Image (cartoon, coloured by chain):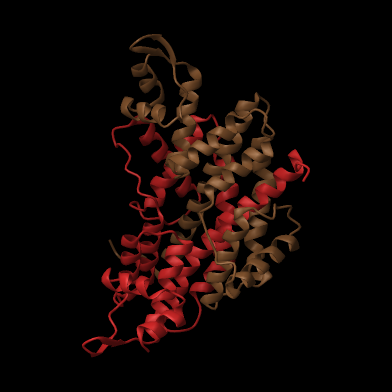
Chain colours: A brown, B red
């Protein structure tokens, strides 16, 4: 198909497709003449994945490029592809390693993770992210006791082991499996986050009362 | 205290404090001479809140300004303060209202929310955010059936009703209650999100195996 048809098929405007081509997010089409290239189903698929990472995951173009490189690298294990997606989703935090408060929070995060029996790489950015959340709770005098945080860990573990694991174990090609893994991570993460805000809004409406229309 | 002492007490560098003063995030200190201003505990508190919204919530300066205005507006109900925080946390999504796919996803999100019995404002940005997640799941042929999404809703509802509600109901001044509400929303949201990625990483390590060191 031509670029205009690729635009219709994917719902992505032609100038945006050209931008993705320039940025190397989308592989070039097959050149059929000096001014014309032919695109196929893999381009439609790739655009769908870029949109999901952009619109739902709010990843930067640089992060999307990294995730796509992992998806395309057939020699990369599924575990490492997921790690790349996680890394892209985690905000960049650069703690001062000499900071006492930080070291304490980081130790606490590490203890919490091992207490849960989770197998997590020592360099996983999620450890730093958890430490930052704990540090902030400390500053506000809010509890970081294991008992206060366990409900979050348990809710997360239940969703992953009872539901999300099936997304990964689907039949299909490696490409489909990798896509499902990446999309599931990003989109279901967003679903959980938005559900929590919806549940909060509803609880708040009941406790504090809604103002009259 | 002087600005240098405020910096030590809050852990925020002096140039950053000056930037917050210029941006109107931090109220001016009491001017004691032409070149000297005196700051107090409320400035320390405010800096703590700004840091949490920035570092954990990743809110923009403009969004933080809106949230702080809500926190300071004593005439604003707690329900509306929470709504302001939620609004700041929700990504800006501007769907094309004429788009058939969008209308369908939005109807689906609305049905899901009413099926859960949740009391959510018709203009809540979380509705649009949920619709976008559903739309993306559709595009990938992933399930948006009520049965597939209910576990996320139930996990969210359980956390809110069994744990987060206590944060709000704490004794204390309005300022403390509002702060706890805003911080709880932002930080516990981050905790849940990061716990899910940690649980995923652990499950993935077990399924796919970790590469040898």
Please report the residue visible at 71 percent of the width from the left and 46 percent of the height from the top. Answer: B203
Q: Reply above or below: A144 against A48.
A: below
Q: Quadrant of the N terminus of chain A?
A: top left
Please say whether residue A179 is visible from this viewpoint: no
Residue A80 falls in which quadrant of the image? Answer: top right
Residue A79 falls in which quadrant of the image? Answer: top right
Q: Reply above or below: A68 against B200.
A: above
Please report the residue visible at 48 percent of the width from the left and 73 percent of the height from the top. Answer: B168
Considering depth in this image, is A20 or B150 the residue closer to the camera? Answer: A20
Q: Residue furthest right?
A: B212
Please report the residue visible at 39 percent of the width from the left and 50 percent of the height from the top. Answer: B91
Please say whether residue B169 is visible from this viewpoint: yes
Residue B19 falls in which quadrant of the image? Answer: bottom left
Considering depth in this image, is B113 or B64 the residue closer to the camera? Answer: B64
Q: Position of residue B53 (x, y in %)?
A: 43, 65
Q: Residue furthest bottom?
A: B32
Please report the residue visible at 37 percent of the width from the left and 76 percent of the height from the top. Answer: B14
Q: Residue furthest top?
A: A33
On screen, residue B110 versus residue B19, left or right, reads right
Q: Quadrant of the C terminus of chain A?
A: bottom left
Considering depth in this image, is B78 or A102 the residue closer to the camera? Answer: A102
Number of numbered tags placed on the structure image: 0
Q: Position of residue A69 (x, y in %)?
A: 55, 33
Q: Reply above or below: A74 against B36.
A: above
Considering depth in this image, is A184 or A47 the residue closer to the camera? Answer: A47
Q: Position of residue B8 (x, y in %)?
A: 45, 81
């Amino acid at each position: 198909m031509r670029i205009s048809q690729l635009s219709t098929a994917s719902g992505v405007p032609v100038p945006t497709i050209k931008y993705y081509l320039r940025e190397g997010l989308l592989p070039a089409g097959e050149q059929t003449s000096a001014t014309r290239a032919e695109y196929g189903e893999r381009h439609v698929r790739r655009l769908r994945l870029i949109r999901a990472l952009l619109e739902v995951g709010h990843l930067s173009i640089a992060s999307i490029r990294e995730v796509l490189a992992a998806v395309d690298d057939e020699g990369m294990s599924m575990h490492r592809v997921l790690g790349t997606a996680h890394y892209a989703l985690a905000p960049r935090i650069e703690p001062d390693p000499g900071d006492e408060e930080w070291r304490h929070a980081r130790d606490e995060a590490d203890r919490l993770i091992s207490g849960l029996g989770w197998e997590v790489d020592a360099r996983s950015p999620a450890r730093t992210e958890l430490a930052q959340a704990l540090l902030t709770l400390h500053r506000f005098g809010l509890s970081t006791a294991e008992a206060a945080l366990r409900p979050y860990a348990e809710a997360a573990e239940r969703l992953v082991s009872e539901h999300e694991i099936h997304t990964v174990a689907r039949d299909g090609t490696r490409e489909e499996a990798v896509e499902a893994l990446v999309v599931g991570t990003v989109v279901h993460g967003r679903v959980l986050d938005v559900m929590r805000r919806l549940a909060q809004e509803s609880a708040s409406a009941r406790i504090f009362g809604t103002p009259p229309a």
